[in-house]
Image: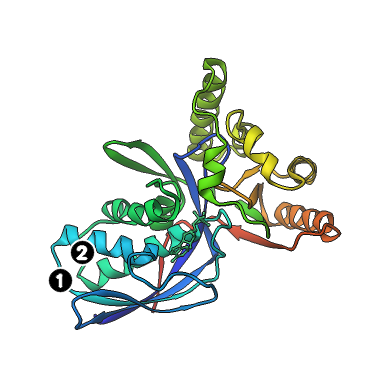
């Protein structure tokens, strides 16, 4: 195998009660990547379309993630990486994670799969370290594994794949304002009261139970965040109104996607998701901010290969 083309999906991290530990994979939002072996003995980013991003291997998350993999594999093989960016950088739906995860997935395949999907997470996290200064796994894990991922611990890294109820839909609003992950991490308080922590881990445990039992109502009641959302939502224009509209239109829950500015509404069924989509679209139409809306199923597979 000399080359491979993959779909690298967008992901929604945190999901209200799972700050830095929970994420899920989207089905129809993502980048395309083409990775080819070269004879140069080095990794190069040969083409980026759709976005203005660094071409230098050391400054592009795809390059950094692949270099981490090659070092661990003790391989001198070179690769050319082309990225067709459809997820906007800084959108909060895992733009950097898609490139990191897509690149390590592709290179692993071309090397004859020396690593498992779970082992690839640590390499993709090096891309996240470059993008945000923090090697978090809650976007790269669901991008690589699909469905929902739970980061049980970072040291040692232990990631679990959770089941996704088949009727779940995500409506994502991306208001075109810039919030850097670095900045939105900076405003979060570093300590949490015991009372809030108890509520948060109660919700997270209930959410995991809901995923295993297909309990959509419990899932909705668990999508709460008393720790990060009250602070971060200040950065997102009309957050409270959007949340009210989504819940009134039938969404199970509503929250910030990753570090924002994108927000998500989790819904049961296509019909409800379309209603939520339409109501959010109507509400945002007369605001001065440009925006993008997505409606997606949960992608159970993660990265997909184009045959
Ligand atoms: P997101 O949460 O959507 O991934 P971040 O703000 O965390 O957004 O990451 C985007 C940052 O990563 C930008 O500064 C961007 O220049 C940098 N970056 C480097 N390479 C890539 C890439 N291949 N795809 C996306 N972002 C990249």
Q: Quadrant of the N terminus?
A: bottom left
Q: Position of residue 111 (x, y in %)?
A: 20, 70
- Residue at the farthest top position: 194
Q: Which residue is denoted by mark 1 in the rendering?
A: 76
Q: Residue at x 45, y 45 (%)?
A: 163
Residue 261 is left or right of residue 249, and the answer is left
- Report if residue 252 is visible in the image: no
Q: Position of residue 88 (x, y in %)?
A: 57, 65
Residue 235 lies in what quarter of the image? top right
Residues 260 and 178: in front is 178
Q: Position of residue 3 (x, y in %)?
A: 30, 80
Neighbours of disc 2 within 10 Å: few (<14), some (14-19), many (20+): many
Marks 2 and 1 sit apart, C-alpha to C-alpha, by 7 Å
Q: Which residue is denoted by mark 2 in the rendering?
A: 70
Q: Is residue 66 above or below residue 161?
A: below
Q: Residue at x 31, y 76 (%)?
A: 44
**Labels in figure, total:** 2
Determine whether the residue tagged by mark 2 lies in a helix, strand or loop.
helix
Q: Position of residue 23 (x, y in %)?
A: 48, 46
């Amino acid at each position: 195998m000399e080359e491979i083309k993959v779909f690298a999906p967008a992901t929604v991290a945190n999901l209200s009660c799972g700050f830095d530990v929970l994420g899920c994979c989207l089905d129809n939002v993502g980048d395309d990547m083409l990775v080819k072996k070269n004879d140069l003995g080095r990794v190069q980013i040969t083409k980026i379309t759709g976005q203005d991003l660094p071409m230098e291997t050391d400054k592009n998350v795809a390059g950094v993630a692949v270099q981490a993999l090659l070092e661990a594999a003790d391989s001198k093989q070179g690769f050319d990486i082309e990225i067709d960016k459809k997820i906007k950088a800084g959108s909060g739906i895992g733009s950097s994670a898609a490139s990191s995860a897509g690149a390590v997935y592709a290179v692993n395949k071309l090397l004859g799969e020396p690593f498992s999907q779970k082992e690839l997470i640590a390499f993709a996290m090096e891309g996240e370290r470059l993008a945000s200064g923090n090697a978090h796994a809650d976007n790269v894990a669901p991008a690589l594994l699909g469905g929902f991922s739970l980061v049980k611990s970072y040291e040692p890294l232990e990631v679990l794949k959770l089941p996704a109820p088949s009727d779940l839909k995500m409506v994502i609003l991306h208001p075109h304002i810039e919030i850097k992950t670095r900045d939105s991490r900076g405003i979060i308080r570093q300590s949490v009261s015991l009372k809030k922590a108890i509520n948060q881990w109660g919700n997270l445990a209930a959410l995991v139970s809901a995923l295993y039992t297909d309990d959509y109502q419990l899932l909705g009641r668990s999508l709460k965040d008393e720790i990060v959302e009250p602070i971060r939502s200040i950065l997102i224009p009309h957050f409270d109104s959007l949340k009210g509209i989504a819940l009134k239109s039938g969404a199970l829950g509503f929250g910030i996607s990753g570090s924002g500015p994108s927000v998500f509404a989790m819904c049961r069924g296509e019909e409800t998701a379309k209603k939520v989509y339409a109501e959010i679209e109507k509400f945002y139409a007369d605001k001065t901010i440009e925006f993008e809306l997505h409606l997606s199923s949960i992608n159970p597979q993660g990265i997909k290969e184009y045959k």
